[in-house]
Amino acid sequence: MNTHNYYAFYGSLRRGMRLYNQFAGSLNYQFSAWLNGYELYSLGNYPYAVKSPNQKSKILVEVFTISDVEVEREIQEIEKGAGYFLEQFEFGKKTLNIFLYEEPVANNLRVVSGDWVSFFRQ
């Protein structure tokens, strides 16, 4: 088990959401945090995040470790297959992985609150 691979999930892999429920047995919740410098957009049933020049823009993430390397690989394949790329960044004393889009897609609704779960459940 590689406990050094921390993932910041903001959408369907957050607790209680569809992909989380699919992989819950291998996802180990660590903590929640707001990340500044990101914007969240809706693709309907799931979101995507992009980097923002506005440091006041923020998204809510749940940070997990993944205890099964096959599940980790499967999640990476799902995310990359949906057009995301994986980026690493420093947060506190941890290196986190996050799946992002390069830029906003025309006509996608911005999730101003930055909290996908609250937005999706409305």
Image (cartoon, rainbow, N blue to C red):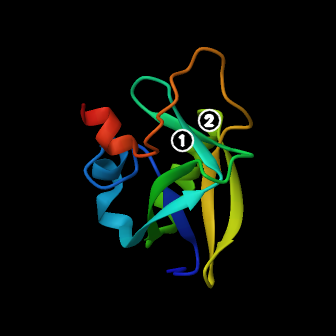
Q: Is residue 88 left or right of residue 69?
A: right
- Looking at the image, is 37 positioned above or below residue 42? below
Q: Give the mark count.
A: 2
Which amino acid, mark 2? Gly
User: What is the crowding at mark 1: few (fewer than 14 residues within 10 Å), some, or many (at least 20)?
Assistant: few
Quadrant placement of the C terminus: top left
In percent of width and height, residue 24 lies at: 30, 59
Secondary structure of residue under mark 2: helix
Q: For this rendering, which residue is in front, 61 or 64?
A: 61
| Residue sticking out furthest to the bottom | 93
Q: For this rendering, which residue is in front, 90 or 71?
A: 90
Q: For this rendering, which residue is in front, 62 or 65?
A: 62
Question: Which residue occupies 48% across, 35% down?
Answer: 47
Question: Which residue occupies 59% across, 14% down?
Answer: 107
Question: Which residue occupies 61% across, 69% down?
Answer: 96
What is the distance, in whole Å, between disc 2 and disc 1 at their CAs?
A: 5 Å
| Residue sticking out furthest to the top | 107
Name the residue beneath numbered marker 1.
78
In percent of width and height, residue 98 lies at: 60, 56
User: What is the crowding at mark 2: few (fewer than 14 residues within 10 Å), some, or many (at least 20)?
Assistant: few
- Looking at the image, is 81 positioned above or below residue 2? above
Answer with the quarter of the image where residue 35 lies. Answer: bottom right
Which amino acid, mark 1? Ile
In percent of width and height, residue 56 lies at: 60, 52
Question: Which residue occupies 71% across, 56% down?
Answer: 87
Answer with the quarter of the image where residue 18 lies. Answer: top left
- Looking at the image, is 109 positioned above or below residue 87? above
Name the residue beneath numbered marker 2.
81
Q: Is residue 113 left or right of residue 80?
A: left
Secondary structure of residue under mark 1: helix
Q: Are marks 2 and 1 in contact (CB under 8 Å)?
A: yes
In percent of width and height, residue 30 lies at: 40, 75
